[in-house]
Amino acid sequence: MKRESFHRISRRWALLFGGVGFLLFLLQGGLLFHNGLEERTKDGDALLLAATHSFSLTLEGELDRASFLAAAPERFASLAGELSLFARLEGDRLVQVIRGHLPRGFRLPGRAGMTDRWVISDLLNPDGVPQFVTVRTFQGNDYLLGVRLNTSGLEPFADENVAPFLTDPRGALLWHDPRDPSGLGVPLDHRGWLDREVLEARTWKEIPLSTGRSVWARTQGVEGARISVLIPVASVLGEAMRFVYPALLLLALMGGLLLAFRRLWNRQVLPEFRGLLDLSQVLESRLAVARDPEEVSASIDDLSKDVQERLDACRMEEAHSVLASLLRALRVLWRQQEEINAFGEEVSAMNASLEESNEFLRKREQIWGQTLRVARLVKGTHQAREEVAHIAETIKDMLGAFGVVVDRLEGDKLVPQAWSGYEEGLPPEPVKVADSLIGRAVREGLVWAEDVRQTPGYLTLHDSVASEVALGLVHMGRAVGGLTVSFQERRPRDEALLETLTPVASVLAGYLDASRAQQEVRDSYDYLARKLQEITGIYHNETEQHLERIGAYCSRIARDLGREQRDVEDLALFARLHDMGKLKVPQEILTKPGALSEEEFRTIQRHTLWGAEIIGDAAWLAMARRICLTHHEKWDGTGYPFGLSGEQIPWEGRIVALADVYDALRSPRSYKPGLPHDEVVRTILRGNDRTRPDHFAPEVLQWFQENHDVMDALYDRYQDLPLG
């Protein structure tokens, strides 16, 4: 009887119908993708045309409006339109500010690049929002114009398939749809720049973005800016796949195939498998009731005859092979019975060994799990330090060690960072690298001291220690510390234990190196800030104690108001630089004992802007720049230089404003005596002719009302040294 493999039959039909279905999917999907992409590029072209036309008309209209207002400035309030900045220039200085927050006398940087052309800039807007700016001549006078970016014409075009972006000529991102239906805006916003390939795409082309997504893009310039339209390839492809209607036909076809398969299964395959199932049940029941070797032999003989009968009647090749194999297995089963009994004891011993191995692996898994948490927390040094202590405790408990120490290399010494055990009678003392077992491990990589009393260089950690393993911790080729594991009993070298400790040592080395690098960066920040603080104090007679007090006040207020620890530390550091701009104020004005003239007072006020200029636009100094700009702003909007009010004032400026006023009132100066604490409290909480409670943020004022005695104590702690 000729037999044919069911596997061969099913594979032939599956390949046939699967190939046809796949080809239909490819053809229909490709056509829909092409049509969808063509439609979206048309939408993108329409968006570029409309946006370019809109921006050009808006800027031309504002130029016409500015020309009219230059002749009739009294009508500015009713005809200002989109003008956010309008000021008259003489040379590069503002002599009349009709609209905007720039102070009169402000020197305009880079005027030449703005004359008779529109540029994008965020330097002339206190809130940092970019705007179109230009210098134009009307009625024989030069005017500085600023026009808000009006992106309302771009938002209606944005959806999940078309994403417009507005950038400056260098590619810095100025605007994207805040709804971000395409999902491209947030990652590009975090990066802050569009890819250069996008900016250079004058016609539609496919571009892989640095964020990992692929898009079709086109860019067009308009009045000093760039408008880029991005079409996510994935969204167009997904939209095409949703409309692959022929898939329904393929589904129906596959249903017919399933019916045919079911009929084939029921007529040819299922009876054979049912026979195998019945046979397996008989085999199970007969062997289950056998109680001795004779019964097992008789059951096997009867089962062999039954299998032989089924084998002769079988038509299916696969089932025939199974039955033949089963028959051979039954014939050798009896011979194996005795061998199985003989192996019983060996299996029991193996089970015990496996249980021991499983317990060791469980302990290793727990140690590595604790280590993985440290690897994830390396950026947060304080939290990671606690986890390192947990690692030491876990190693001690899981390996049955007497004690564990993690040391950090500092110069020629190893300083303990975390430890556990040793009957909790430590902490261990720092040891020199050249004179210790762990120092030798740092140099050589690994030292296993089976008997510490016979090992040169061993320094006694505890009298109960008998054996010790010391691993050097190395990160990027540089020694950073050591790991010591001590045992009360003598332990020969154990490779499995070393395999457990090796990845732990790698993570600990990374943590120690990262904590060192973080501390070095932090020390550099502190050093630079203190040097700038010293320069400021030398120039305008600010005492070291005054600047220390400002930092102490501000950090305490910020911590009590719930700011994060990093914010508190940065504020304590950068608040000392709040008067950096006074370096540019003439010395005779700073030390003038009498009242200042109006012009001298305006010069003093500019120290906020000058401080921001001196600090610059480095990202890590952003808080210092905000403090310089806003520590004289007042909650009611009467402060300077921008007249900000309420929530417009950054949180750092609100805190430094109160701290600066308090210390200024307490401290004696060449032109006034210092006031006692109680009188300063009354002045801030009740007000006088110069200071009012509504000058300060409500939450900061509330804190002061409840905790002003803290500031009194800080003032006494950092009391100015007597002049002499």
Image: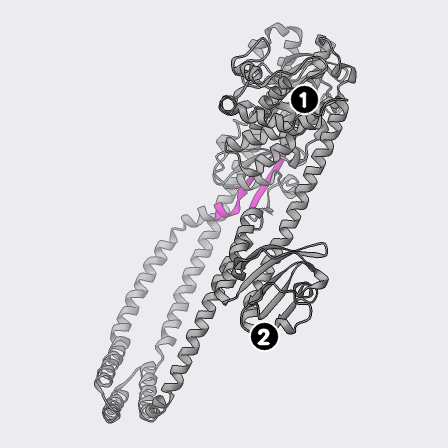
Does residue 96 lie above or below 116 as drawn?
above
Which corner quadrant holds the N terminus? bottom left
Q: Is residue 671 magenta?
A: no
Is residue 123 rendered to the left or right of residue 43?
A: right
Is residue 283 rendered to the left or right of residue 513?
A: left
Residue carrying label 2: 493
- Residue 101 position, x and y percent, is 63, 17
Q: Residue at x 53, y 30 (%)?
A: 154
Q: Secondary structure at mark 2?
A: loop
Please state which amino acid type lies under the numbered disc 1: Thr
Between 206 and 474, which is closer to the camera in this rendering? 474
Q: Secondary structure at mark 1?
A: helix
Q: Is residue 217 magenta?
A: yes
Please state which amino acid type lies under the numbered disc 2: Arg
Q: Does the rendering let one see residue 130? A: no
Magenta region, residue range: 213-237
Q: Quadrant of residue 504?
A: bottom right
Residue carrying label 1: 608
**Spatial separation of the CA atoms under disc 2 and disc 1:** 67 Å
- Residue 704 position, x and y percent, is 52, 23
Q: What predominant SS class does the magenta segment belong to?
A: strand
